[in-house]
């Protein structure tokens, strides 16, 4: 019932320098903009939304998240970014990922989890992972499995859990420093494809802290203050 990530929103104090950062280093175009928010097209029908903190949902702070790219493009991304950042790399066996930070302290990952593109320059193909900081890990696991996520990995010390819809993963982290000294995001705002948004929201109705109808779907707020919008 759940599918790919449609958007991730990050909170930024000043839009112009952060927009310029992503356009310069990741070559992503602006899809739309307003006084409060700029939306970037990051491939795979996904958006990165940069939002100033003057309303709710706010957007995530110090969020660790991952863009997908093709295996063919991964080395080209490394070559493009290595002169400007102290990149870190992790080889997960079937996938490699590089890590660096944006001006707002978000840990940006680019992983070779995407399909090949026809572009001459390296391209992104969507968002395949977002990390949420949670206070009660077992409670958060139960909340997200009831939504339709499947647990695929857990930390040996129970500090993190990875859940997936197939095309999109959420990691739930207790407060700690993870890979590349990343932290889980707080009050993160994401959009997720769903075959039946109302039914998904109903599955956790007793535990949400807010629910509202939005254009094309339903938005809820989880017990840790993260917003999820399910879109048909």
Image (cartoon, grey):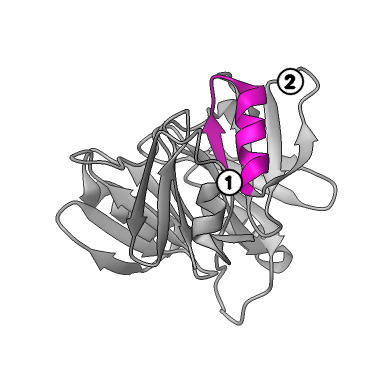
Which residue is nearer to you in this view: 124 or 7?
A: 7
Of label 1 and label 2, which has the lower sequence position?
A: 2
Q: Residue furthest bottom?
A: 118
**Residue 144 on the magenta segment:** yes
Q: Which residue is mark 1?
A: 203
Where is residue 20 shown, x and y percent of the image? 30, 55
Q: Is 87 left, or right, of 53 in this rendering?
A: right
Q: Which residue is mark 2?
A: 158
- Residue at 33%, 65% (x, y): give it: 215
Which residue is nearer to you in this view: 171 or 206?
A: 206
Task: Say whether marks 1 and 2 touch (CB < 8 Å).
Answer: no
Which residue is nearer to you in this view: 172 or 220?
A: 220
Q: Identify the disc placed on residue 211.
A: none
Toward which corner of the image does residue 130 lie, by quadrant? top right
Q: Which residues are magenta?
A: 130-147
Mark 1 surroundings within 10 Å by alpha-carbon count, few (fewer than 14), some (14 through 19), many (20 or more) = some
Where is residue 194 shown, x and y percent of the image? 56, 62
Q: Is 150 left, or right, of 177 in this rendering?
A: right
Secondary element at tag 1 = loop
Secondary element at tag 2 = loop
């Amino acid at each position: 019932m759940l599918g790919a990530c449609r958007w991730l929103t990050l909170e930024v104090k000043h839009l112009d320098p952060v927009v310029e950062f992503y356009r310069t280093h990741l070559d992503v175009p602006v899809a739309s903009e307003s006084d409060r928010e700029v939306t970037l097209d990051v491939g795979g029908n996904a958006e990165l939304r940069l939002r100033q903190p003057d309303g709710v949902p706010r957007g995530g702070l110090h969020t660790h998240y991952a863009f997908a790219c093709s295996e063919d493009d991964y080395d080209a991304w490394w070559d493009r970014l290595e002169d400007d950042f102290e990149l870190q790399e992790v080889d997960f066996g079937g996938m490699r990922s590089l890590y660096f930070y944006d001006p707002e302290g978000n840990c940006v990952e680019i992983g070779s989890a995407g399909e090949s593109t026809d572009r001459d320059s390296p391209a992104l193909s969507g968002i395949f992972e977002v990390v949420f900081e949670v206070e009660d890990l077992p409670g958060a696991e139960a909340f997200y499995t009831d939504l339709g996520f499947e647990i695929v990995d857990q930390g040996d010390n129970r500090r993190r859990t990875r859940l997936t819809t197939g095309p999109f993963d959420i990691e739930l982290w207790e407060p700690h420093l993870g890979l590349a000294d990343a932290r889980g995001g707080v009050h993160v705002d994401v959009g997720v494809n769903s075959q039946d948004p109302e039914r998904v929201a109903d599955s956790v109705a007793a535990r949400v802290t807010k629910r509202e109808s939005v254009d094309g779907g339903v938005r809820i707020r989880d017990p840790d203050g993260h917003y999820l919008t399910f879109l048909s």
